[in-house]
Image (cartoon, rainbow, N blue to C red):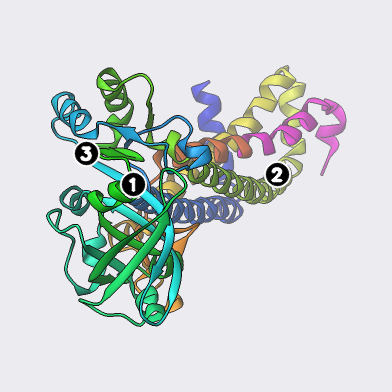
Amino acid sequence: MMRLLMLAARNLTRNLRRSLLTGAAIAFGLTAMIMMITLQEGSYAEMLRSGISMLAGHVVIEHPDYAEEAEPELVVTDITALGERLHEVLPDAVVAPRMQIGGLLTSPTNSVGVGLQGVNAAAEKQVTDFDDKLVQGEWLDDADDRGILIGAALADRLDVGIGDKVVFMGQGKGSEVESQLFRVRGIFKTGGAELDGFVGMTTLAPTQALNHTPDSAHQVTLHLKNPKLAAEARDRARSVTPPEWKVMTWDEAMPDIVALIRLDRFSGDVMMAVIGVIVAMGVLNTVLMSVMERIREFGVLLGIGMRPGRVASIVLLEGLVLGFVATVVGIGCGIVAAYPLVTYGLDYTAFMGSETMEMEGIVVSSVIKGAYGWNRIAGYGVAAIGFTVLSAIYPAYYITRLEPVEAMRSV
């Protein structure tokens, strides 16, 4: 086998220019693929990071029906005691309870429908970057049950500023409409139209009072230093959580985002497969031309008694060597070419007009840093070698059908 492998490698050098051009096409294709998937994986990572910090957590505890119905009364109760138990089994995790109430935010000049989110201010500051998005005012204080943060677009529509009064009216648990007076403590700007125009944020106490559910939250989220431990953390959290509450990992809590990423990744893989087929056709042309130029040589080998299968294996090995060398070069070049994307990222600020952009309702930075998707890179490398070998199958089969005498007469 080693002799055949060396013979196949030597045959590729007979027309070195053609072999180099074909190998370069494979290597260039792989380099482009790796750069694309690096940027893809980086955007997925940023989307998940933002979604986990703002919309869910690495582990989420909520009422079993809340995700489907989102009714105000579907709360997790006794969250203080639950938080203490969670800290015992997960001492390094940040426990961040959240409550959501829809209603109307009113100023002296206007009224706007909003979603009011109640949070633990100290915990929320650790797990989100909302405090960095403040353009005016200051972050919430858990001791202040009248402070509210609103988006810049919402502040413009209500024509209010720092220190101004606004009234929230909403229907919590039960049928009565409740109201609460707030003072604007801060104004944030995320770059997301929905967040900046229709969201208010306050501490837990006033939202609990509006909902008539003390010591409760719609979600109790846990945020970990190591996201890879989410499944283990879920199991630990489940061991101290009453059975009536649902305990989920981030991918179970955000199925739409996970499905979107899987669909986008699949569509990218399909496009790469199409490019692979096109490159494979070029390899087929190269190998077939090489075979046709050596018909007489193959006829001699068959005439002296070499089995057709062994002769065909030489052609297959030529495809294997060509594919392997080109793949190694392509992966190496792709990793090097993608390094600036991983280190510095790709800045979309000039195209988006701001330092953030909205992706499927999630606000992310407009500077997307790439991330090496090692599994996909390895998969594409194996596929490139496989496509190259497959391209050599027909020329190899053609050789097995040759008649030695006629082949030796070929000019």
Of the two numbered discs 1 and 2 on the same chain, state the one appearing first in sequence: 1
Residue furthest to the front? 176
Q: Nearer the viewer, residue 387 or 367?
A: 367
Of residue 180 and residue 219, the one placed in the foreground of this image is: 180
For label 2, the SS is helix
Please give the residue where the numbered disc 3 appears in the rendered image: 95
In the rendered structure, which disc, 2 or 3, sits on the residue that comes first in sequence? 3
- The structure residue drawn at horizontal position 53% and vertical position 38%, both measured from the top left corner, is 68
Foreground: disc 1 or disc 2: 1
Residue under the point 15% across and 53% down: 142
Q: Quadrant of residue 231?
A: top left
Q: Is residue 83 visible?
A: yes
Residue 99's disc is 1
Residue shown at 18% from the left, 60% from the top: 140
The location of residue 67, given as percent across then percent down, is 48, 38
Residue 317 point in image, percent of width and height: 59, 31
> Quick one: 112 or 220, which is closer to the camera?
112
* Residue interval drawn in magenta: 388-411
* Amino acid type, callout 2: Leu
Q: Residues within 10 Å of mark 3 (few under 14, many from 20)?
A: many
Which residue type carries mark 3?
A: Val
The 10 Å Cα crowd at callout 2, few under 14, some 14 to 19, many 20 or more, is many
**Which structural element holds mark 1?**
strand
Which numbered dot is residue 324? none
Amino acid of disc 1: Met
Residue drawn at the location 30% of the way across and 59% of the way down: 201
Where does the C terminus fall, quadrant-wise? top right
Q: Which residue is mark 2?
A: 284
Q: Position of residue 364 (x, y in %)?
A: 37, 61
